[in-house]
Image: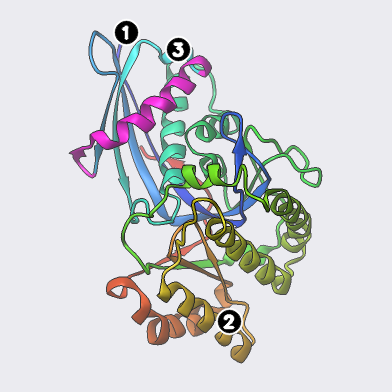
Amino acid sequence: MKSFTAHWRSPSNIALVKYWGKHGVQLPANASVSFTLSECHTDTLLTAVPRSNGQMVKVWVDGREESSFLPKIDAFLKHVMPVLPELKDFSFEVRTHNTFPHSSGIASSASGMSALALCMYDIASQVTGKEMNLEKVSELARLGSGSASRSVYGPVSVWGDHDDYDGSSDRYAIPFKGHDKIFSTYLDTILIVDRGEKKVSSSVGHGLITHHPFANARYEVARKNMKVMKRVLAEGDLETFVKIVEDEALMLHALMMTSDPSFILMKPYTLKIIEMVREYRKTNRSFLCFTLDAGANVHLLYPEAEKASVGDFIENELKQYCADGYYICDQVGGGPFKID
């Protein structure tokens, strides 16, 4: 046996209609749709070495060996090995780098686990000669992080079974085809309100909705929003897009605030930014909107045609509410790619 390597870059994504709650092995309680990002990505270099007695996996983050990630990767490998049995006789060395803060509500698990899944499937393909299959990669990525299933495609992807999306499945994500060209121009400026790690992991958050009194109502709203969003994406209906995206973000945080135990993930400046975005949109007849992941940081979504005006708004008025004035300029991207 010989060693094999694979090197992939995979992006994070930002959900427009959120999935919150799961069942089985990383299966979603409701379908979701997301924009794939570009600049917020993870680069992962995976080396598979013939295994003798010893540790099955080692992880380096930004050049430093990091043992805190081992439990999650070990759990992921236990799911992967029955799917890729050709890798069972290897040990793995994982070297990874994020371009954005880890565990701060920018879906680092989505980019990280999708990059790892791409590397794993790539090496399996080298061993067996089979071709890369993004549907299978998406299914593998889901086993590590549900939202990672969507990062396998760009610029728009859907995860979760829904009657209005042909080919959709709880097991893997699919690319959304037929979106209006304006959405390929969308920008995402991420205002880093808080650089620290979240008070509660997304995995814990998903578990809290299982017995939530509003769970069934939430699933019904998500189902309806997915139905409407399909039309919105196809027609370029930006007014309805703004409403759904913001409603979904606030509902996610409302569920967390009314769970047991309760968590408040937004910070005072998060709310301040939301208020200012709404006022800016009203005053300037803009299509700028906000969304949030499970954290305090704010994603500002807007078409490229508004880049200059929104950029001035961010720099002159919103930057002061970012930690150390820090924000990330991103855009809708085309999905992952292999690094030679």
Question: Compared with residue 115, is residue 279 higher up or lower down, i.e. above or below?
Answer: below
* Residue 124 % position (x, y): 45, 20
Of circles 1 and 2, the one toward us is: 2
- Residue 33 lies left or right of residue 140; in this view the side is right
Callout 2–callout 3 Cβ contact below 8 Å: no
Q: How far apart are marks 3 and 1 (CA)?
A: 12 Å
Query: Which is more N-terminal, label 2 or label 1?
Result: 1
The residue located at (51%, 83%) in the rendering is 276
The answer to whether residue 253 shows anywhere in this view is yes
Query: Which is more N-terminal, label 1 or label 3?
Result: 1
The residue located at (46%, 17%) in the rendering is 81
Q: Main secondary structure of the magenta part?
A: helix
For label 2, count other residues whose C-alpha is less than 10 Å away and answer few (under 14), some (14-19) or many (20+).
some
Residue 278's label in the rendered image is: 2
Q: What stretch is highlighted in magenta?
A: 62-83
Determine if the magenta segment contains residue 71: yes
* Residue 330 % position (x, y): 45, 63
The answer to whether residue 184 shows anywhere in this view is no
Callout 1–callout 2 Cβ contact below 8 Å: no
Looking at numbered disc 3 in the image, what kind of residue is underneath it? Glu
Return the residue nearer the eye: 152 or 281.
Answer: 281
Query: Which is more N-terminal, label 3 or label 2?
Result: 3
Looking at numbered disc 2 in the image, what kind of residue is underneath it? Arg
Per the image, label 3 sits on a secondary structure element best described as helix
Looking at numbered disc 1 in the image, what kind of residue is underneath it? Met
- The residue that label 3 is drawn on is 86
Q: How far apart are marks 1 and 2 (CA)?
A: 60 Å
For label 1, count other residues whose C-alpha is less than 10 Å away and answer few (under 14), some (14-19) or many (20+).
few
Q: Distance between the residues labelled 2 and 3?
A: 53 Å
For label 3, count other residues whose C-alpha is less than 10 Å away and answer few (under 14), some (14-19) or many (20+).
some
- The residue that label 1 is drawn on is 1
